[in-house]
């Protein structure tokens, strides 16, 4: 079942008993996040939460939408993510291009006739620019945070020359009703676009979308290869073209079914201190300069719902988003590197902290494997990379630990490059005679 907008997804979750409504008025300063955090860490059902009343806002708030494997799969229109992974794996077998980025682009072109469908009737017809960002029930989740943050917004940008769009998920700190800060790292799609605009001395147009198809919200946080747009990948996975509309202040195209749309621009050289921000590591990201988004207009649909997530020590919602990314990007890596058997990125790492990889490549050295993997979009930022033999159950923590702690001479099975470590825990025959127990 495909969900074209956030509210149809919320309705279905409520119909199947996977959503809880909080009808009491809740404060967006710490209190709302505390409730969400408690729900995510509960031992019972970790349901999605709909807050009907947020202090000083007329807009209800929904959180923990993707807080289970089941709901992430639902957002992508399936009951099991592995079904989509197998579909991707089968399609890649028909492609002779070996690099996974161009290969994915080719199979999408082959299998998708239409990735976007232009709409002249956007849902967001109410102009609330006078109130601006103040209309949003944005949360301050942790006491040391620098302020209120948008945490589930899709940030749309495009390249000034190629006009290629990017949809990324970057944290956005609200300063006042017309000013926010966007933390997009230099290597990200939005960061590359920002550099290109500012090198030409031009302001970069930006649109931030809240809501729309849940599948696109998930995809915004995915480290896709640069050849593939988020619209294309979602259309490939769901078999549905996304209805889009053009922004009022730029030629950026955004989902017509959005709940809220924020339009603005980032001027060259304009930065302000952003942070601190409490993240999944249990620490605060320190204050650092971030580009300033000057908001021009804010639009919302009638009876809009504001989606957000709380980032903090696991278990939290973003663990399940990351898990789906791991399973769907694995076939791409296997296409380019057939010696990859499986990948497990422990949920506590949230996308990029650690990767356990089983390989069938005894002829390749630790350095060769590490170099190849760290050039991929999925693993390039992993602080810890552990190489294991084919047949090792990567999700068996005890077995993995046993292999790691008993790895061969660590002077040659451990490599540290800056803040990144690789451990070669394979039992290579040429090192020692292996006995089975």
Image (cartoon, grey):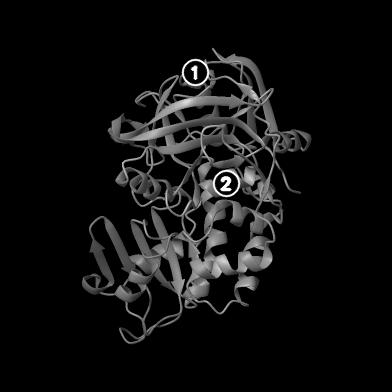
Q: Secondary structure at mark 2?
A: helix
44 vs 165, left or right, is right
Q: Is residue 285 visible?
A: no
Q: Which mark identifies residue 345?
A: none
The residue drawn where x is 49% and y is 65% is: 343
Query: x, y percentage for residue 202?
Result: 35, 40
For label 2, the residue is: 218
Compare residues 332 and 249 and report the one nearer the observer.
249
Quarter occupied by residue 184: top left
Which comes before the other along the chain, label 2 or label 1?
1
The residue drawn where x is 45% and y is 19% is: 177
Which residue sits furthest left?
Answer: 411
Q: Is residue 333 above or below residue 219?
A: below
Query: x, y percentage for residue 30?
Result: 46, 21
The residue drawn where x is 54% and y is 18% is: 135
Q: Is residue 383 above or below residue 124?
A: below
Compare residues 231 and 52 and report the one nearer the observer.
231
Query: x, y percentage for residue 350?
Result: 45, 48
Query: x, y percentage for residue 96?
Result: 56, 80
For label 1, the residue is: 134
Q: Secondary structure at mark 1?
A: helix
């Amino acid at each position: 079942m495909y969900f074209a907008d956030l509210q149809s997804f919320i309705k279905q979750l409520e119909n199947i008993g996977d959503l809880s409504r909080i009808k009491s008025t809740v404060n967006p300063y710490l209190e709302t996040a505390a409730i969400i955090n408690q729900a995510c860490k509960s031992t019972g059902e970790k349901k999605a939460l709909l807050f009907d009343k947020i202090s000083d806002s007329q807009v209800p708030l929904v959180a923990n939408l993707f807080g289970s494997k089941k709901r992430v799969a639902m957002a992508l229109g399936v009951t099991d993510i592995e079904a989509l992974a197998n579909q991707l794996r089968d399609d890649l077998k028909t492609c002779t291009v070996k690099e996974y980025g161009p290969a994915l682009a080719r199979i999408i072109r082959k299998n998708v006739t239409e990735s976007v469908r232009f709409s002249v009737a956007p849902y967001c017809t109410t102009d609330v620019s006078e109130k601006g960002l103040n209309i949003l029930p944005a949360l301050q989740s942790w006491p040391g945070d620098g302020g209120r943050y948008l945490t589930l917004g899709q940030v749309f940008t495009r390249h000034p020359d190629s006009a290629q769009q990017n949809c990324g998920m970057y944290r956005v700190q609200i300063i006042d009703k017309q000013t926010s800060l966007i933390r997009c790292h230099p290597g990200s799609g939005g960061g590359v676009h920002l550099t290109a605009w500012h090198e030409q001395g031009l302001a970069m147009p930006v649109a931030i979308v809240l809501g729309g198809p849940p599948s696109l919200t998930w995809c915004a946080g995915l480290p896709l290869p640069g050849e593939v747009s988020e619209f294309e990948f979602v259309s490939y996975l769901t078999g549905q073209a996304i209805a889009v509309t053009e922004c009022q202040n730029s030629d950026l195209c955004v989902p017509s079914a959005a709940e809220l749309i924020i339009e603005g621009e980032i001027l060259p050289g304009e930065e302000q201190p952003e942070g601190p921000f409490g993240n999944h590591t249990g620490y605060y990201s320190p204050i650092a300069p971030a580009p300033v988004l000057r908001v021009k207009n804010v639009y919302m649909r009638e009876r809009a719902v504001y989606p957000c997530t709380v980032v903090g020590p696991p278990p939290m919602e973003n663990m399940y988003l990351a898990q789906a990314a791991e399973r769907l990007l694995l076939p791409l890596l296997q296409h380019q590197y057939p010696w990859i058997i499986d990948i497990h990125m422990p949920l506590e790492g949230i996308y990029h902290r650690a990767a356990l990889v089983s390989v069938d490549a005894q002829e390749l050295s630790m350095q060769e494997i590490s170099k190849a993997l760290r050039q991929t979009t999925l693993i390039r930022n992993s602080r810890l990379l552990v190489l294991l033999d084919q047949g090792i159950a990567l999700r068996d923590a005890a077995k993995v630990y046993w292999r790691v702690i008993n790895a061969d001479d660590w002077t040659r099975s451990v490599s540290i490059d800056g803040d990144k470590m690789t451990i070669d825990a394979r039992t290579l025959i040429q090192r020692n005679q292996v006995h089975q127990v």
